[in-house]
Amino acid sequence: MKESAVPRKWLIVIGCAGFGLIVLALGVYVYAATSIRSWYVTIPLGIGIAGILAFLVLSAMISRTARYGSNVAVMILLAFCILVLVNFVSARRFTRIDTTTGKQFSLSEQTRKILRGLDQDINVTAFYTEDHYRRRFAEDILNEYALESSKLHLTLIDPNAKPGLAIAYKIEQNGTVVFESGDKREDVESYQNEEQDFTSAILKLLATEQKKLYFLDGHGEHDIDGYDDNSYGELKRVIEGENYQVGKVVLAGQASVPTDCSVLVIAGPQKPLLSQEEETIAGYLDRGGKAIIMVDPTPSPSLTSLLEKWGVEVRDDIILDLGLPLFGDLRIPATVRYEYHTITIPLTGVMTFFPVARSLSPKTDSANQQLEVTQLVKTSNDSWGESDTGLLLSGQRVGYDEGRDIKGPMCVAVAVVVKEKSEDVEPPPRADQPPEEATKEKRVLVAMGDSDFLASKYIQPGNLDLFMNSVNWLAEEEELISIRPKDQEQAQVQRLTGRELRLVTYSSIFAIPLLLLIAGGGVWWKRR
């Protein structure tokens, strides 16, 4: 048999095509990795393009069969170029979709809002060894931060591989993340809630001042320094994480509220306040102070004399809800129903609940026309305010009594502002028109008919967001009003039943090969 020889022209064509493809691929890979247009990127790309052009010219000069072959080669080359281009673009502009139920792998709205508003560079240096059990979690979250803002620059360092850098940064603990901006520095050692701790560090770098919350003490209020289920210890940690200072104040021995108080919090007193204390709080509010006042149902004090002055009616009842009772307990109304307000806008679709709460409402006969009382949270239409609280608390069965009880929806929280005349009035467009009266808002207080919803045993994201949004609104820190970072939850893998396991096994072993066999048989039958 005569030995077939490959024409010299074919060798030239194949050689040029192969050389061009290889060099072009190398050039694109280097550019994708460096994103720098330099000679070691430009030259390989030029050589690759020249090789491909040589391939096209030479292939056109040979036989018809060769031209057909060259067309196939061009199609293959085109498909390869499209594949390279798609990978090149996707490496720079890509979208990730979080399909988990609680969006566990997505940043919270609060974190995104803070990162988008960055106007100064923040350098983040994370020191984790390769075997650190939280390295992957922290690295994923910090990468999300860097993708959200070009102002945040991330560097990951293994202190074992680069001990000199760890010494220079004075790192003593494996798992330390350093946030720097200018001459400010915040170190974070987080082992559970990385996003909360990282966002808190950024807030501290950005803050020009640190506002302070005071919690009233001395009347059986929830203890912010406690560790039991009824304390506010967990709440205090979150407040401090948003760059607020937290302290206690006993007004019985003071003539006024501390001057550095940004917001005064009265968290469910169980004993009546002295008249002197109520006067001190009233004077503080008159002078422009802000307060969050939480009152529990009888027998706890209602603070009626303090709240009525600001247009808030405190009802002597306990809210019962047939529409959405938490765990089937009518005394714990849950709700996703909020009126439109800066505090509640981010809470759309987020549940809050209130264990044993009394209802509030705006006073219709308030003498002060400058007051504006806005209802924030409402229960379902199937709720009512049970007026026979003694019978209910004794454990006896109660029901809605028309004419005696108030039919729902019931209001659980209100916000109060004072409308004042403003001197900054724009002149009218025509001289014969009177100037429009301009007003400005003075935020005074947020009142709530329950204080237990923030206790450590009940605190959950919705309840926490309602309170912190109220704090930020009163403190005029609107950029922090949002949904907060959530605790990480471990994904639960559902165990398959025996029937489900057999279905998966048989479909994998028999069903897929059978479908391929049927498809192949159909193709053979059509072409036979």
Image: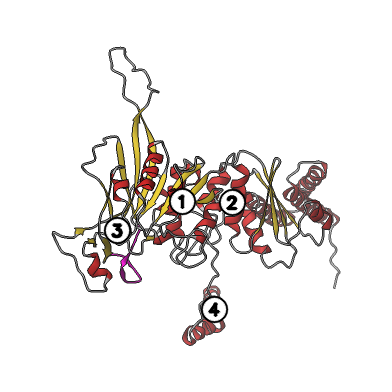
Work out whether mark 1 precedes mark 4 in sequence or the reverse, and give the earlier one: 1
Observer-side mark, 3 or 1, equals 1
| Residue located at (48% from left, 49% from top) | 214
Characterize the local packing of mark 4: few (<14), some (14-19) or many (20 or more) Cα atoms within 10 angstroms: few
Give the spatial CA distance, label 1 vs label 4.
74 Å
What's the magenta region?
Answer: 323-336
| Residue located at (74% from left, 49% from top) | 28
Q: Badge 4 is on which residue?
A: 512
Left or right? Give the position of 264 relative to 326.
right
| Depicted 429 relative to depicted 523: above or below | above
| Residue located at (52% from left, 78% from top) | 515
Work out whether mark 4 precedes mark 2 in sequence or the reverse, and give the earlier one: 2
Query: Residue 343 in the image: x percent, y percent?
Result: 41, 47
Give the spatial CA distance, label 2 vs label 1.
29 Å
Say which of 230 and 16 sits in front.
230
Q: How is the image coloured?
A: secondary structure
Furthest toward the left, the residue is: 403
Observer-side mark, 1 or 4, equals 1
Question: Magenta span has 209?
Answer: no
Q: Badge 3 is on which residue?
A: 358
Quadrant where the C terminus is found in the figure: bottom right
Q: Secondary structure at mark 4?
A: helix
Residue 250 disc label: 1
| Depicted 182 relative to depicted 521: above or below | above
Furthest toward the front, the residue is: 253
Q: Label 2 amino acid?
A: Ser
Work out whether mark 2 precedes mark 1 in sequence or the reverse, and give the earlier one: 2
Give the spatial CA distance, label 3 vs label 2.
34 Å
| Residue located at (48% from left, 63% from top) | 102
Question: Magenta span has 332?
Answer: yes
Q: Label 1 amino acid?
A: Val
Give the spatial CA distance, label 4 vs label 3.
62 Å
